[in-house]
Amino acid sequence: MARPQALDWSRDAPTWPHAQASRFVSAGGWRWHVQHLGAARGSHGVQRPVVLLLHGTGASAHSWRLLAPLLARHLEVIAPDLPGHAFTRNEGHRLLTLPAMAEGVAALLQAMQRRPRWLIGHSAGAAVAARMCLQGSVEPQALVSLNGALLPLQGSAGTLFSPLARWLALNPFVPYLFAWHAAQPSVLRRLVESTGSRIDEEGRALYGRLVRDPSHAAGALAMMASWDLQPLARDLPQLRVPLDLVVGEGDRTLPPSHAERVRALLPSARITRIAARGHLMHEEDAAGVWNVLKRLWPELAGGAPAHEDAPRVRAGSLP
């Protein structure tokens, strides 16, 4: 049985996806692990447009390992490990609330002297991206939410989730117990399958390495314990950045109806549905998600810009 083992860049880098694109940046009280792809200037010496990728709770920049290279053919890609996750470590006493995390990512972008033209957030990463837009720390051309967790959960799950997470996060032994339990192959397999996605063996192995790290587990639990989406739900109608909600119809983690609730608050949001894909759809079908992104925003792949007068409300179904 695998035992808890902290991630160590000096040891793990040779087998970590896109390690050659990794760098470490101190900003906002965190020592960030960032993967930076496609930074070469274009044929005329012009800097490429920047896209910022933000992963979800319990994941890391590794979750973009298949999609990031597709984006990097045309764009400069910045994909950090979020605070408390994987190789991003605290350099002081920093909170993991949604506003604090948004401020932290903004500080990272400032340190890197980058202004993203597009934001792509998965699950909780979409909430961080939306809060950054609402705080005015970024002014992207568009925000793409991949199975985004933008509103509080409904029902008993929403009532019990945060208090339980807070209780777990306060217990210093829980991250070690979680890491020990989740490292069991059968438990890890069920965790991944519960998302409704089928990812490759490399992806499962990488999640295994993450969940075996008590520090990563503690960061994920602290993030969940500090998470309050009520203010975001209140402020979301003020979002001025065009929002595209890309939804996997097979998502078992976040009901696809979640996107309809978001659009009820923000009628300008567009919904695109992808059949038979789960919560980790960008990992199980990176090419399919890339094709969706190109259809939504042709400029992502160097095509013609989307028409400014195009209707912002659209629902579709893609194979």
Image (cartoon, grey):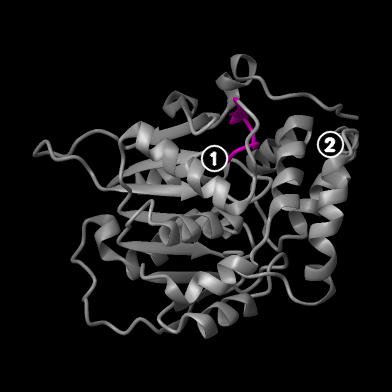
Q: Amino acid at mark 1?
A: Ala
Return the x and y of residue 109 as percentages of the image width and height: 38, 39
Secondary structure beneath disc 1? helix
* Left-right relation of 151 to 40: right
Q: Which residue is mark 1?
A: 61
Characterize the magenta stretch by its predominant secondary structure.
Answer: loop
Part of the protein shown in magenta = 81-91
Q: Amino acid at mark 2?
A: Pro
- The quarter of the displayed image where residue 230 is located: bottom right
Q: Is residue 133 above or below residue 44?
A: below
Figure quadrant of the N terminus: top right
- Does residue 319 show up? no
Return the x and y of residue 201 as percentages of the image width and height: 67, 42
Counting other residues with Cα less than 10 Å from the Cα at mark 2, is it few (<14), some (14-19), or many (20 or more)? many
Question: Are the residues tagged 2 and 1 within 8 Å (C-beta)?
Answer: no
Q: Nearer the viewer, residue 35 or 248?
A: 35
Q: Which residue is mark 2?
A: 175
What residue is at 64 percent from the left and 38 percent from the top?
A: 202
- Does residue 152 show up? yes
* Left-right relation of 105 to 177: left
| Residue positioned most to the left | 44
Q: Is residue 288 magenta?
A: no
What residue is at 42 percent from the left and 70 percent from the top?
A: 239
- Name the front one of labels 2 and 1: 2
Q: Is residue 220 above or below residue 271?
A: above
Counting other residues with Cα less than 10 Å from the Cα at mark 1, is it few (<14), some (14-19), or many (20 or more)? many
Secondary structure beneath disc 2? helix
Number of dots carrying numbers: 2
